[in-house]
Amino acid sequence: MTSPLEQKKIRIAGPSVVTANRTWDGVVIYRTSQHGWSSDLSDAAVIRTSDEARALLAESVADDVGAIGAYIAPVEIKDSGKIKPGNLREHIRLQGVTIELPVPA
Amino acid sequence: MYAYDELDRTLINERVSEFRDQVKRRLSGELTEDEFKMLRLQNGVYLQLHAYMFRVAIPYGTLSSKQLRRLAHVARRYDRGYGHFTTRQNIQFNWIKLAELPDALADLADVGIHAMQTSGNNTRNVTSDQWAGVAPGEIADPRIWSELIRQYTTLHPEFSFLPRKFKFAITASAHDRAAIKVHDIGLRLYKNAEGETGFEVLVGGGLGRTPFIGKTIKPFVHGRDLLSYVEAILRVYNQYGRRDNIYKARIKILVHELGIEKFAQEVEDEWQQMRATDTALTLDDAMIEDIRSRFSYPAYEKLPHMPDELKKAAHDAHFEAWRKNSVAPHKVSGYAIVTLSLKPVGGPPGDATADQMDAVADLADKYSFGEIRVGHEQNLALPHVARRDLPALWKALDKIDLATPNVNLITDIIACPGLDYCSLANARSIPIAQELTRRFANHDTANLIGRLHINISGCINACGHHHVGHIGILGVEKNGEEFYQITIGGRADENAEVGTLIGPAVPYGEVADVIEDIVEAYLALRAQPDELFVDTVKRLGVEPFRERVYATR
Amino acid sequence: MPLVKNGKISRDALVHVADDAPIPDGGAILISAARFLEDPEALSRRAGGTGVIWPNNRDVDDLVPYLDRLAVVALVFPTFRDGRAYSQARLLKERYNYRGELRATGQVLRDQFLFMLRAGFDAFEVKKDSDAEAFANTVKRYSVFYQPTGDGRMTALHRRMMLRHSESASQ
């Protein structure tokens, strides 16, 4: 959960995705393999090598109008192929806060 | 209440127009994020984990009922129906859309609310204590000087791109409720031996990675020289503060690296040169009076200290428990300052729903001359309540869950938003706070323990002020798991000091148990029932607590 | 990179001379502080006029003896977020009464124009053409200013004082 915002060296430890926030409304988004973004993690392009990561991050960062703060985030791939967030921080980003909101959504 | 005039309102509106244009240029791509980020920060707009966060300024924690209703409107219209009151007397909304921000700001500007400089490397909200202007024993209302500094620092051309953020706090009471000793500039208003009003100026206090208690740079600055002296400090900082490393960029590092004497000399040299050629910043009585005149004070009635309504209500144990806990003496006889606890059992500390905000606004109109205060302990206050109205007010507050009688007790927890919201965090803070309020929910137990401030921060940036908590809890990360360091013995008042670590960090699931152990140790070790936790720690040191906590861990 | 002076895009009268290039006999030039300080007496008296680029991490004190003979002092914003040049500008204009052209260079962007103007800059090497074109409108964004600088704009406090005087005078 140490802030990945300071990532300098691109080094991935396992399957990862590129994630960011949508510029106009701040919603969490994931880079797809079709050079776009989706708020659905299952649409995310999964990268497995540092080279793939570097390339995907570079094209994500280049989309300065559409997204801000792009970085590489770990994911877990289930046997079923389903993509799940790879740590608590990414879990919170996807699912929202872990507490009950004062006003039910 | 401070009344904005046409000039103030024009400035706010001009700021909204400017930001609207900046957002437009950002969304069209004319501005890159690198060019835009500092601009949005200067309007209080952060990026958090799953959305933008919008921090609205509540200058020196004072709000009118009209303004509070408008905050409720923003919560409903642009956010998810609630807001969070912060440790710097501001309010935060967690789900705001950038594209809608100019409209939200325009709605706020209507009632004289803005978000100028609530973030960014500039001068932030000048905080005071939530009892300013109504506390007994205050020599003057510090908010008048807060407003003078607010205006002087707002959109200051020379100081809008400082090495790092810059925070002021002012107190006018012997007991410092504004934590001036842990601010970049702390100001203590007092009258000197000649009866002149002025300030002890402290500099270089702050928490975060490298906590420092502020040092006195000048024991007395005459009121008329306040702004010119502050300008000298800011100019020295702007020029010589470090810009190579954001973790070493606060003024506290500059003061530490130069030493207070050398730093004071630099400021003095600058100040003397400034005064030799330029008196534009010298405040004369007319200017101070102008600001003071736009603060309105209620037309208090002559009321008895023990009215019938209060006598009758005294038999109600619940009312009495609340009254003894949440009601503080007022400088005007027959009145009281009422704290509204935003720390219900199991709730996130410092949050209020839009419905609660509207209800508090109505209660303020009815019982507090339309005025509300926001405290840095993340509670609200009604500053002008007639004592005869206390029973009726209590009933109304109880209905909306704002009468938890835990002010200053162990469940009156100060916590940052933590990993549930904040992209800087290592660990969550709110669930820790919630569990602690459940463990110590019993009112009698909490009273038995007495005054005990728990502060929780989700990372070393210390927005929960954990360093100066009687018990401080700091979230860290170990191998992808949430762990927490516990400190004890910190305090934020005129005897400010940083707490001491009791031992290795403990995992998420054990924090509440550890706090229980610490409390048990305190209850066993205190010299008498009214020896506060923090004083027991001072007397005995950390060792007995460390032993208790780590004996079986 | 357009130069904005007097609110509009202007031709730059100065030629930027690199540290290793020879100083021309005539014409207005802009040179680095290091170059200038090698021979400040002569360089500041060049008939064509000399401007100096002063770094933002150096006190302006060393430049002060030559201020009345310099055509231009150029200060630097390495990024727009580095605000040291604002202090330098105010010191040059307000403490040392510098009367030549005070030029902003570096990452000079639209949203800082008004701060720069108020701090004492009167010429701007603007990064983007669109920003340069928008200069005149941008500096009209605000009509209310809380704090005094050397720019002569009346502060809100003073406007209120004047209003009060005229109110009480007319009573």
Image: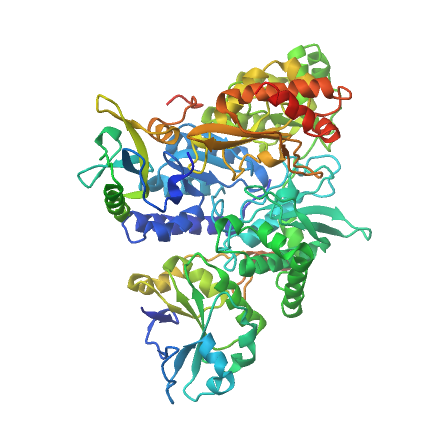
Q: Is A12 rendered above or below residue C101?
A: above
Furthest toward the right, the residue is: B193
Tell me which residue sits at (69%, 17%) in the image.
B448
- Residue B144 image point, x, y percent: 64, 46
Number of numbered discs? 0
Point out residue B80 in the picture as x, y percentages from the top left corner. Answer: 39, 28
Q: Quadrant of the C terminus of chain B?
A: top right
- Percent position (x, y) of residue B103? 37, 41
The scheme the figure's colours follow is rainbow
Vertical order, B378 against C149 (above or below): above
For residue B253, above or below residue B451: below
Q: On the image, which quarter does residue B437 sit in?
A: top right
Considering the image in quadrants, where does the N terminus of chain B appear? top right
| Nearer to the camera, B220 or B283 | B220
- Is residue B413 something that shows in the picture? yes
Determine the residue positioned at 32% across, 33% down: A74
In which image quadrant can residue B498 be found? top right
Q: Is residue B406 visible?
A: no
- The single residue placed furthest to the left in the displayed view is A34
Residue toward you, B384 or B161: B161
Image: B533 above or below C94: above
Q: Residue at x 61, y 57 (%)?
A: B233
Q: Is residue B329 left or right of residue B230?
A: right
**Snapshot quadrant of residue A55:** top left
- B276 displayed left or right of B155: right
Residue occupying image coordinates x 42% and y 41%: B46
Return the x and y of residue A48 as percentages of the image width and height: 24, 36
The foreground one among C108 and A62 is A62
